[in-house]
Image (tube, rainbow, N blue to C red):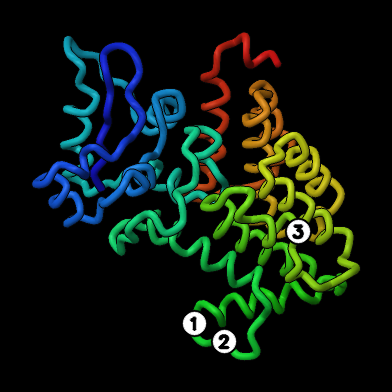
């Protein structure tokens, strides 16, 4: 997987614009590889200097030399052993809105980018509105395709939300659906899905499921002042109803919410207390380290808040 770093020795980079697509030969070549609009470019943005330096520091050991050798010394080695930048891919495919909060990159506008089978983030961004629409719509009597069937199966699990014996399964399903929708859509697009979800017909959900729905509603609305406390309360009050993957997601969400609110000094404490006995794997483990590193990289004056 290739990554392109765009930088300037002074000042700020200009905002993305569509001038390049209006150049005849270059525009044609870009469209040939699936880049047809500013949204296609934005979809491939992973972050900026502030958000990416912490993850680069996690992934790379700095090398001292008389020139600037990090790429020139490490890239050939990684290419030789077939290594891939899973950390960067993970930022673009995370089940939380990492790019939006850390990199200040808004979700891609629906229908304004070209889905690319070779680029997983674009497929997930295409899938997000489909899943959201399937949840918000009136449930069809019969599923017409595999996607509708998967959505119908998920809806059926959540629909019985008054059945306490299945709290863990319901919360896992809710977490999965959130990861497929919230990072790729804005609050307005998520209103009928999570903020005012008419598709959840159970009038009296259990306390644990109700708490999870409250967390999700605040997250969909990008109300991080409420996301953090609600997620902490869910972890502390309903631990028995939470699987390890659900706890892992909630811990990472608490850390992200603290960052969104500028409470950088709280991030490591949240990880150490709420996740002290929780083992995360793969990208999720790296994400916890990344969130800590991002918070620790912020100026001391802001970390005191």
In the foreground, 64 or 49: 49
Estimate the x, y position of residue 235 in percent, counting from the top left: 78, 47
* Residue displayed at 63% across by 51% down: 188
Name the element at disc 1: helix
Residue at 70% of width from left, 37% of height from top?
A: 224
Residue 123: quadrant of the picture: bottom left
Marks 3 and 1 in Cβ contact (< 8 Å): no
Of circles 2 and 3, which is in front? 3
Residue at mark 1: 146
Residue at image mark 2: 143
Q: Which quadrant would the C terminus be assigned to in this image?
A: top right
Label number found at residue 196: 3
Q: Position of residue 50 (x, y in %)?
A: 45, 23
Sequence order check: which comes first, mark 2 or mark 3? 2
Question: Which of marks 1 and 3 precedes in the sequence?
Answer: 1
Residue neighbourhood size for the residue with mark 2, other residues' Cα within 10 Å, grouped as few (<14), some (14–19), many (≥20)? some
For mark 3, give the secondary structure. Answer: loop
Residue 276 seen anywhere in this rendered image of the structure: no
Crowd tier of the residue under label 1, counting other residues whose Cα lies within 10 Å: few below 14, some 14–19, many 20 or above = few
> From what the image shows, is residue 215 above or below residue 202?
above
- Measured as percent of width and height from the top left, residue 37 is found at 30, 48
Give yes or no for contact between labels 1 and 2 (Cβ–Cβ under 8 Å): yes
How far apart, in angstroms, are the residues tagged by discs 1 and 2? Answer: 7 Å
Residue 61 in view, yes or no: yes
Left/right placement of residue 278 relative to residue 52 reads right
């Amino acid at each position: 997987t290739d990554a392109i770093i765009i930088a300037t020795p002074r000042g700020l980079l200009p905002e993305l614009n569509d001038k390049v697509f209006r150049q005849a030969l270059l525009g044609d070549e870009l469209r040939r590889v699936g880049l047809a609009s500013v949204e296609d470019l934005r979809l491939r943005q992973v972050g900026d200097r502030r958000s990416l330096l912490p993850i680069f520091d996690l992934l790379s050991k700095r090398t001292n030399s008389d020139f600037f050798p990090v790429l020139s010394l490490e890239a050939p080695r990684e290419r030789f052993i077939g290594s891939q930048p899973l950390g960067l891919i993970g930022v673009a495919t995370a089940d939380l809105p990492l790019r939006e909060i850390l990199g200040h990159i808004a979700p891609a506008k629906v229908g304004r980018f070209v889905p690319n089978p070779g680029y997983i983030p674009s497929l997930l961004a295409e899938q997000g509105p489909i899943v959201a629409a399937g949840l918000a719509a009136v449930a069809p009597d019969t599923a017409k395709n595999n996607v509708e069937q998967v959505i119908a199966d998920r809806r059926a699990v959540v629909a019985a939300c008054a059945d306490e014996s299945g709290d863990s399964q319901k919360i896992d399903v809710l977490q999965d659906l959130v990861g497929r929708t919230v990072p790729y859509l804005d609050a307005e697009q998520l209103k009928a899905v999570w903020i005012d979800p008419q598709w959840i017909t159970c009038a009296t959900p259990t306390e644990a499921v109700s708490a999870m729905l409250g967390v999700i509603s605040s997250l969909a609305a990008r109300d991080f002042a409420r996301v953090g406390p609600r997620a902490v309360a869910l972890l502390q009050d309903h631990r028995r109803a939470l699987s390890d993957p659900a706890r892992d997601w909630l811990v990472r969400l608490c850390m992200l919410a603290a960052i969104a609110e500028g409470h950088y000094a709280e991030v490591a404490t949240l990880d150490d207390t709420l996740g002290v006995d929780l083992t995360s794997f793969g990208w999720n483990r790296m994400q916890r380290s990344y969130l800590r590193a991002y918070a620790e990289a912020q100026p001391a004056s802001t970390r005191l808040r």
